[in-house]
Amino acid sequence: MKVSGGLMLSILIITLFSCNLITRKEALLVNNTLVGINDTLYLKGKAFGLLVGDCYKAKNFSLLKQGRIEFEHYIDDSRARVAKMKDVGGSEALRYCEIELLDVEKRMIKKDFIPFEELTAESTLEQVNHHFDMVKNDSKDETAVLNKLRALQADYAKKNGFTLIRKNE
């Protein structure tokens, strides 16, 4: 059976094009999964900060532990999820950077968030602000990893043929 060169070329092009579409779709799913994790991290961090303010006003810091534990579980679960993800379209560096970010978040929980739980009804605003200053200082590592992640994400999107839409930050 003789197959023409044009037919073989057409089959090859269709196969490569359809594989590229599958990879693009999977790559976009990887990206969107990481974006979802990071959006939730941001919201949980913001909620914890607001909770600290509410606890200060109520002079009752006992409510912080449960919120911190839930935040910590989210980080642990997200890290396990990202570690198990299949690499698609060159996502290795992006995925490893996400794991690095989650590790930074975990360290901040341990080093910066738990001390808020030790505050009491007698704690002063200066003591609360001291803890926030610690968070602010340690968030420099978080910012550095986030910037690295954004650069890797932009490169990943370009390599896989999709456009990133940035929310106002």
Image (spheres, rainbow, N blue to C red):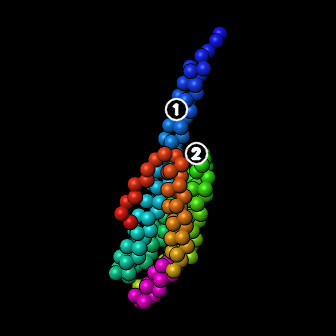
Foreground label between 1 and 2:
1
Label 1: few (<14), some or many (≥20) within 10 Å? Answer: few
- How crowded pointer 2 is (Cα within 10 Å; few <14, some 14-19, many 20+) is rated as some
Q: Main secondary structure of the magenta part?
A: helix
Farthest right residue in view: 1
Q: Residue at x 43, y 50 (%)?
A: 163
Tell me if I can see residue 116 in this picture. Answer: no
Up-down relation of residue 17 to residue 48 (above or below): above
CA separation, marks 1 and 2? 15 Å
> Disc number at residue 67?
none
Q: Quadrant of the N terminus?
A: top right
**What amino acid is found at the position of numbered circle 2 in the picture?**
Val
Looking at the image, residue 118 lies above or below residue 156: below
Q: Is residue 23 visible?
A: yes
User: Which residue is at a point 48% across and 68% down the rendered structure image?
Assistant: 68
Q: Residue at x 46, y 50 (%)?
A: 32
Q: Quadrant of residue 62?
A: bottom left
Q: Are marks 1 and 2 in contact (CB under 8 Å)?
A: no
Label 2 residue SS: loop
Per the image, is 127 magenta?
yes
From the top left corner, tell me how far across and down residue 34 is, in percent.
50, 54
Of residue 120 and residue 136, the one placed in the foreground of this image is: 136
Quadrant for the C terminus in the image: bottom left
In the image, residue 141 lies at what x, y percent? Answer: 55, 73
Q: Which segment did they paint magenta?
A: 124-136
Tag 1 residue: 18
* Residue at image mark 2: 88
Residue 110 spot, x, y in % from top left? 56, 73
